[in-house]
Image (tube, rainbow, N blue to C red):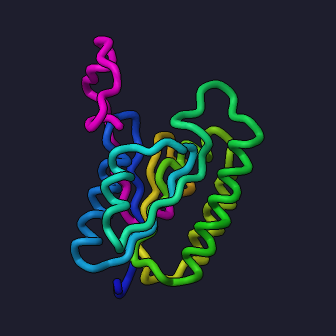
Amino acid sequence: MLKKGLMQIYTGNGKGKTTAAFGLALRAAGNNLKVFIGQFAKGCSYGEIKAVKKLKNITVEQFGRSCFIKGKPRREDIKKAERGLKRIEKVLTEKKYDVVILDEINIAIHLKLLKTKDVISAIKNAPKNIEIVLTGRKAPGELIRMADLVSEIKEIKHYYNKGVKARKGIEF
């Protein structure tokens, strides 16, 4: 158990925010900490999910209907995100986990699936010994100001721009 948990944000337009959070989850699990990963706006079975589900001290739940929301989100997307935030609130109050990762929460806020104030409320009420990690592009300023660590993943160059499609085992 952590003596003091901090709040981390991985944001920006570059590739690697979720990967960084999953790396932290692996490090925590390797040190016998219990990790909960809630993925917002995602519903596909990615490689990292398949891998961490094999570990007994990492739990993953998804709060999205598809791999990626294209176009305007549907009512169903909003409902899944709202249910996800309620689940996160419960996870935080249960105090069973040392690390709680809200993957793609920032993009869920940007897409108006959730309100920033509701996410802040859930986080503010968390016990002080839980590490909270938020990922996704377009992190709101209010969350950035609250965070203890903010890393911006910046794209310098990306092979997508040359037509390289997402590759199994690398991007998903």
Rendered residue at 69%/59% (across/down): 83
Q: Is residue 145 left or right of residue 166?
A: right
Rendered residue at 55%/76% (across/down): 92
**Residue 154: x percent and y percent?**
32, 35
The image quadrant of residue 147 is bottom left
The verdict on residue 165 being magenta is yes
The image quadrant of residue 113 is top right
**Residue 74: x percent and y percent?**
73, 35
Q: Is residue 65 left or right of residue 135?
A: right
**Residue 97: x percent and y percent?**
44, 78
- Check the image and report above or below for 2 versus 69: below
**Residue 60: x percent and y percent?**
46, 61
The image quadrant of residue 110 is top right
Of all residues, the one furthest to the right in this rendering is 75
Rendered residue at 23%/77% (across/down): 31
Tell me if residue 141 can be seen: no
The verdict on residue 166 being magenta is yes
Which quadrant is home to the C terminus?
Answer: top left
Q: Is residue 117 left or right of residue 20?
A: right
- Check the image and report above or below for 93 versus 39: below
Rendered residue at 29%/62% (across/down): 24
Q: In the rendered structure, which segment of residues is drawn in magenta?
A: 144-172
* Nearer the observer, 54 or 125: 54
- Chief secondary structure of the magenta portion: loop
Label total for image: 0
Tell me if residue 127 can be seen: yes
* Nearer the observer, 36 or 119: 36
Which quadrant is home to the N terminus?
Answer: bottom left
* Nearer the observer, 128 or 55: 55
